[in-house]
Image (cartoon, rainbow, N blue to C red):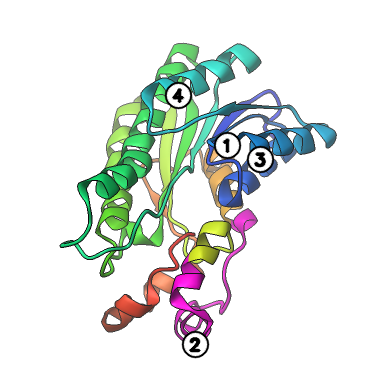
Amino acid sequence: MSDMNGKVAVITGASSGIGRATAELFAARGAKVVLAARREPELATLTSEIESRGGKASFVVTDVAIAKDVERMVAHAIETFGRLDYAANNAGIEGKFEAITDLSEEDWDRVLDTNLKGTFLCLQHEARAMLAGGHGGAIVNVGSINSFLGFPTGSAYVASKHGQIGLTTSVSAELAPHGIRVNLVCPGIIDTPMHHRARGLLGDDIYDKVVIPRVHVRRAGRPEEIANAVVFLCSDEASYISGTTLTPDGGFTLTVDLDDLATSILFVDL
């Protein structure tokens, strides 16, 4: 893969899991990275680690559901490193898994505000910066296999992830003529803190005997495997790819038995 020396990447949800791995890979490829998330201690630690390896990094505490936070995040990238070339919009929450009859409006709004409105706000401010810079760019949104699959009690999470497909394809159509590519990565079962919480809800027995056997490669994915997909889609090697969805899920979505979704789908890209 071509190096990314001199380029600048913003990564949301960078404090752990897929976001952290993506930030580390961008830095390893030579990009200067801006780390964004709500947890300052984790961001500060990762920034120090990247710099100790010779990389260039800065962080900004950001809640992607708040427009002023997102605007400040992008402004920080421009002020600190002078440009914006890549963005990985990875921040997301699972929210509460409750029956539609019990789910509160507040819980619905919290999930949609972070996962869908947050993606919209990031796209908006990142696109403005890239257009102003005049040198194109690449943006990758991070969805989920639940961008395609629903499950009982998952209405808020699933709706937010389905929405990212339409958002990605529409914004790609707008920005591609300006040299800015937009794609969506939809991970499957990935070994991250969010996933561990879901495993706790399912229990080890269901996870080991029902969930993992549905994955063709018979294991959970690693965060760095998703980072590889994100960084590839930002690279010059993906110059003809825009508006598409890449699904690194070990084959899971090809073999799901819909009758068992209620007991087997809470793993998502957690």
Between disc 1 and disc 2, whose residue precedes?
A: 2
Near-viewer residue (196 or 23): 196
Q: Position of residue 184 (x, y in %)?
A: 41, 47
Horizontal relation, residue 155 to residue 41: left or right: left
Between disc 4 and disc 1, whose residue precedes?
A: 4
Magenta stretch: helix, strand or loop mostly: helix
Horizontal relation, residue 12 to residue 101: left or right: right
**How many neighbours does mark 4 have within 10 angstroms: few (below 14), some (14-19), or many (20 or more)?**
some
Between disc 3 and disc 1, whose residue precedes?
A: 3
86 inside magenta stretch: no
Near-viewer residue (167 or 154): 154
Give the Cα distance between marks 3 and 1: 30 Å
The label number, if any, that marks residue 209 in the structure image: 2
Q: Which residues are magenta?
A: 198-225
- Give the residue number, with chain letter if any, for mark 1: 236
Q: Are marks 1 and 2 in contact (CB under 8 Å)?
A: no
**How many neighbours does mark 1 have within 10 angstroms: few (below 14), some (14-19), or many (20 or more)?**
some
- The amino acid sitting under disc 2 is Lys
- Give the residue number, with chain letter if any, for mark 4: 69
- The amino acid sitting under disc 4 is Asp
Q: Position of residue 24 (x, y in %)?
A: 69, 42
Q: Position of residue 91 (x, y in %)?
A: 47, 42
